[in-house]
Amino acid sequence: LQTAISNALKVEAVEDEMKRASRRRGGGHLTFKDMITRSPAMDRVIRLGQKAAASNIPILIEGESGVGKELVARAIQGSGDRRSKPFVTVNCGAIPDNLVESILFGHEKGSFTGATDKHTGKFVEANSGTLFLDEIGDLPLDVQVKLLRAVQEGEVDPVGGRSTVKVDIRLISATHRNLLQQVKDGKFREDLFYRLNVYPIFVPPLRDRRDDIPY
């Protein structure tokens, strides 16, 4: 466990330095040029990411916790035509179930107890840019239904709202779970899975790319 924690901290330090280097270069956009690797497996990730950056199709990034899934997502955004647009991150596993819908899709003032102000939601915040939904496998089933509509129709229904709101986003999702198994277990919607898994990218675990761990 101590070794795993140490490796994770080292990788986090490398990611922080890559972000700082990107900012020093100007523009503040992380790209695949910032991802230095000696691992053939990561070379494949970079090639897939570069191809993904040239389109706007939904991407699902899979891999264990701490392997750099958000780093790959940011490099995709920074290498595409939305590089100068918002990059909004949501950790779906860190949001209480009763607030997920409001945080993602927004709410109107007074729509529920505690809604003292109008909230636009992460989809609207990311409009014209990229929305990164981390730990997508932790979304409650009822919210998955509304996410499916948002992906299919390009619009969201704010809680308590009277009309839908159109959004134009690039959607990148990530998970450490086996989503296909969750589909079989009835914990994740099959139709949503196939909507998100249009372009899968698997980020290998650190044990399979030890050359990338600084000593």
Image (cartoon, rainbow, N blue to C red):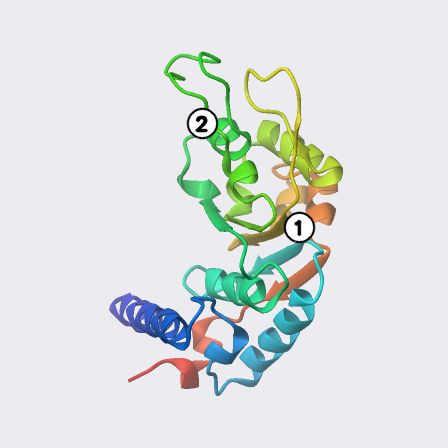
Q: Nearer the viewer, mark 2 or mark 1?
A: 2
Q: Identify the image quadrant of the N terminus.
A: bottom left
Looking at marks 2 and 1 on the same chain, the residue that comes earlier in the sequence is marked by 2
Determine which residue is flagged by label 2: 99
Tell me where residue 70 appears, x and y as whole percent.
47, 60
- Tell me where residue 99 sits by quadrant: top left
Determine which residue is flagged by label 1: 180
Secondary element at image label 2 = loop
Secondary element at image label 1 = helix
Nearest the eye: 7 or 147: 147
Nearest the eye: 57 or 12: 57
- Tell me where residue 56 sits by quadrant: bottom right
Reply above or below: 54 against 163. Answer: below
**Residue occupying the point 40% across, 12% down:** 113
Q: CA distance from mark 2 to mark 1?
A: 26 Å
Reply above or below: 182 against 62. Answer: above
Tell me where residue 74 appears, x and y as whole percent.
50, 62
Tell me where residue 115 appears, x and y as whole percent.
41, 17
Give the residue type that dot 1 points to.
Leu
Nearest the eye: 76 or 61: 76
- State left or right for residue 105 relative to residue 14: right
Q: Identify the image quadrant of the C terminus.
A: bottom left
